[in-house]
Amino acid sequence: MSEYQIETHSETETVRIAESLALLLKPGDVVTLEGDLGAGKTTFTKGLANGLGIKRTVNSPTFTIIKEYHGEMPLYHMDVYRLEDSDEDIGFEEYFGGDGICVIEWAHFIQDYLPAEYLNIKISYIDDRTRLLAFFPKGVHFESVAADVIG
Ligand SMILES: Nc1ncnc2c1ncn2[C@@H]1O[C@H](COP(=O)(O)OP(=O)(O)OP(=O)(O)O)[C@@H](O)[C@H]1O
Ligand SMILES: [Mg+2]
């Protein structure tokens, strides 16, 4: 169980949590999103984008692995679902610790490439409108970020 968890009761509430998270992130930060199909990973990413002042519509990068958005700082939105069972090296390391924020849907498929410190968020479906967002911070920076968002 996570020390930092919250239930949301609408898409808008999930977006708001992500917006408040975005304000606490700094360039190079990595956020990983786990959760079943339709859990709300892309919805959460939309909130991060809003929080960074990105005006373009964020949608799932189905045919591309990485989409870039430009706001207060770059947002690199990765959906690595299609990398399951593949050893393809996309050069993620160039993005991690770089000039922008990386948000990764289905990050467990690239577990071996993840940096030492990042914020893992698990989104669980409770019912039609309700989701449980559980934050699992790795490292002191993300520990304090999680406490600020949830606390
Ligand atoms: N509390 C909630 N938080 C987030 N989304 C919600 C909530 N309640 C309902 N929804 C709905 O759940 C759906 C989430 O879809 P979304 O594309 O964000 O999921 P996903 O995890 O990215 O799925 P995929 O694995 O297909 O990429 C949206 O249709 C959204 O409106
Ligand atoms: Mg998605």
Image: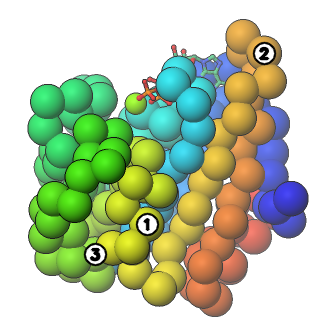
Query: SS class of the residue under badge 2?
Result: strand
- Disc 2: which residue: 127
Q: Position of residue 47 (x, y in %)?
A: 46, 39
Report the image quarter containing ligand 2: top left
Please tell me in which quadrant of the rendered image residue 56 appears: top left
Say which quadrant the N terminus sits in.
bottom right
Badge 1 crowding class, 10 Å Cα cut-off, few under 14, some 14 to 19, many 20 or more, is few
Q: Sequence-wise, which precedes: disc 2 or disc 3?
A: 3
- Disc 3: which residue: 96
Please state if 7 lies on the left or on the right of 77 as rendered: right
Q: Amino acid at mark 1?
A: Gln
> Which of the two residues, 50 or 108, is positioned nearer the viewer here?
108
Query: SS class of the residue under badge 1?
Result: helix
Q: Sequence-wise, which precedes: disc 2 or disc 1?
A: 1
Q: Position of residue 60 (x, y in %)?
A: 29, 29
Disc 2 vs disc 3: Cβ atoms closer than 8 Å? no
- The residue at label 3 has a CB less than 8 Å from ligand 2: no
Q: Give the farthest residue toward the top.
A: 128
- Disc 1: which residue: 111
| Count of marks overlaid on the render | 3
Residue located at (68% from left, 78% from top): 143
Badge 2 crowding class, 10 Å Cα cut-off, few under 14, some 14 to 19, many 20 or more, is few
Residue 95 in sight: no
Which is in the foreground here, disc 3 or disc 1? 1
Query: Is 29 located above or below residue 110 in the figure?
Result: below
Q: How is the image coloured?
A: rainbow
Residue located at (71% from left, 26% from top): 125
